[in-house]
Image: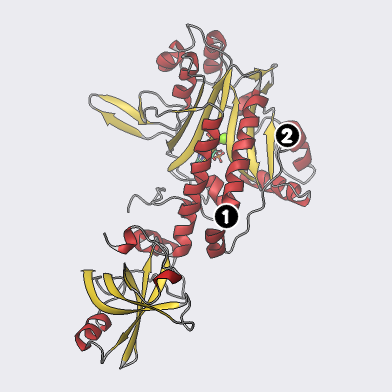
Amino acid sequence: MYRSHYSKEITKTEYNSKVIVAGWVEDTRNLGSIAFLILRDKKGTLQLTILKKKIPELFEKFISLPRESVISVKGLCKENGKVRNGYEILPDSVDILSISETPLPLGVVDKVEADFDTRLDNRIIDLRKPETQAIFKIRNAVLAVAHEYLRSQSFLEIHTPKIIASSSEGGTDVFKLQYFEKEAFLAQSPQLYKQGLMATGLDRVYEIAWYFRAEEHNTRRHLNESTAIDVEMAFIKDEEDVMRILENLVHAMWKRASECTEELDILKKTVTIPKIPFPRLTYDYVVNKIQQRQSPIQWGMDFSTEDERLLGDIMKKEGIDFYFITKYPLESKPFYTMPSGDKYSRGFDLECKGVEISSGSQRIHDVTLLKERLKACNLNPQDFYAYLNAFRYGMPPHGGFGFGIERFLMELLEISNIRECILFPRDRSRLTP
Ligand code: ATP
Ligand code: MG
């Protein structure tokens, strides 16, 4: 096994002993009689110091290596206070595992930042940069704690179909595909399945899943393929029960992120843990507040991006990053949202610094009311036949939310473009790599 496979950091106990290290050639500097090579692996970089007169053939091999080639080196680890990490390696032998082509389409350590499309076109090389990797290490850490938290609250992890017969949410933003003789769609969310499961006795479920949305607009906060944490829970009293799980989940994830000090240092970010419970602002309160600030919004309309930003600014002044918007008008929420009186719903959004990161609600569990709401939303109950069946034979009150992972990371790390937060983004114009 080559060292970089387990990427153990070299410690003082290994000084003056032979070590094997493997990784990518980040840079070489040839000074004639001595050469320095910077080798990089998952844990960082180290310096190889090669003396020409010691083994001339080895010296030639090293200095002719193109950047980003992969090598494994055996040599003496020597303490050296002048080297950044306190030691250097004096190689005895090298295994050249892969020679990189030149020129590189993208530099890994170039001072000048390449444009974003070049970075994404060469994502494999872009992902070699510590600052790009840091985002995905933090992503990994916050998802680990999401699993931990939800399991600790007795949620069962599920996986539901992504090829489905009718659109999950209604609406038109679906990708169609040919499914043998039939037409099918890519799931916009696990909504209909996670709700169906509430009728089974598996009464708390979560899925970390893909959303496929054929939204045509190209924005900084929408992807056509994104990931989310979806939660559904039964026997709730109202949407408050759902909001409590969501705020605790967000709190746990934010806190875990604040502990990723190495990665946050690389990204030059600090993360302040928010206080829970998050404030609950009603839709009516928000409309009033932003109308006073010249928003053209009328009661019943959904908030525009600009409205959300305006509210974000108002809340920021009060020192609040996270807040729920509750009691939305019924007409602005999907058909499955539980009404509250004639005009309002039990739907809510969780906002972070003026950007929606999650939407949820108490759902309708009465099949007659559900059919009525489908019709009121100009959807045909026939198209939702399989979904409606789940409500016919005993369905408890329930609710849940969908919570976008890339949106969350974007707000957490104050990254302006959501494409940074997913390995291989899919947008209107990008299908490769
Ligand atoms: P928005 O209004 O911001 O477009 P939405 O209300 O259409 O979002 P929901 O259907 O409520 O989105 O989805 C739940 C969550 O999933 C959102 O709050 C967001 O975090 C995330 N999400 C939804 N659509 C996208 C997308 N196209 N790209 C990235 N994340 C998304
Ligand atoms: Mg929403």
The quadrant in which residue 244 appears is top right
Q: What is the x, y in percent for residue 389?
A: 44, 11
* Residue 413, label in figure: 1
| 241 left or right of 161 in image | right
Q: Which amino acid does label 1 sit on?
A: Leu
- Label 1 element class: loop
Q: Which amino acid does label 2 sit on?
A: Arg
Is 96 located above or below residue 29 in the figure? above
Quadrant of the drawing holding the N terminus = bottom left
Q: How far apart are marks 1 and 2 (CA)?
A: 24 Å
Is 156 located above or below residue 391 in the figure? below
* Residue 109, label in figure: none
Quadrant of the drawing holding the C terminus = bottom left
> Is the CB of mark 2 within 8 Å of ligand 2?
no
Judging by the rendered image, the residue that carries numbered circle 2 is 280
Q: Is there any visible trace of residue 212 in the rendered image?
A: no
Q: What is the x, y in percent for residue 266?
A: 53, 64
Mark 1, residues whose alpha carbon is within 10 Å: few (<14), some, or many (≥20)? some
Is 281 located above or below residue 98 in the figure? above
Residue at screen point 57% across, 11% down: 369
- Label 2 element class: strand
Task: Count how many numbered circles sit on residues in the image.
Answer: 2
Mark 2, residues whose alpha carbon is within 10 Å: few (<14), some, or many (≥20)? some
Report the front residue among 372 and 263: 263
Q: What is the x, y in percent for residue 426?
A: 40, 48
Residue at screen point 23% across, 24% down: 181
Q: Which residue lies furthest to the top in this view?
A: 393
Is 104 located above or below residue 392 in the figure? below
Q: What is the x, y in percent for residue 408?
A: 56, 45
| 422 left or right of 95 in image | right
Q: Residue furthest left?
A: 57
Q: Is there any visible trace of residue 162 in the rendered image?
A: yes
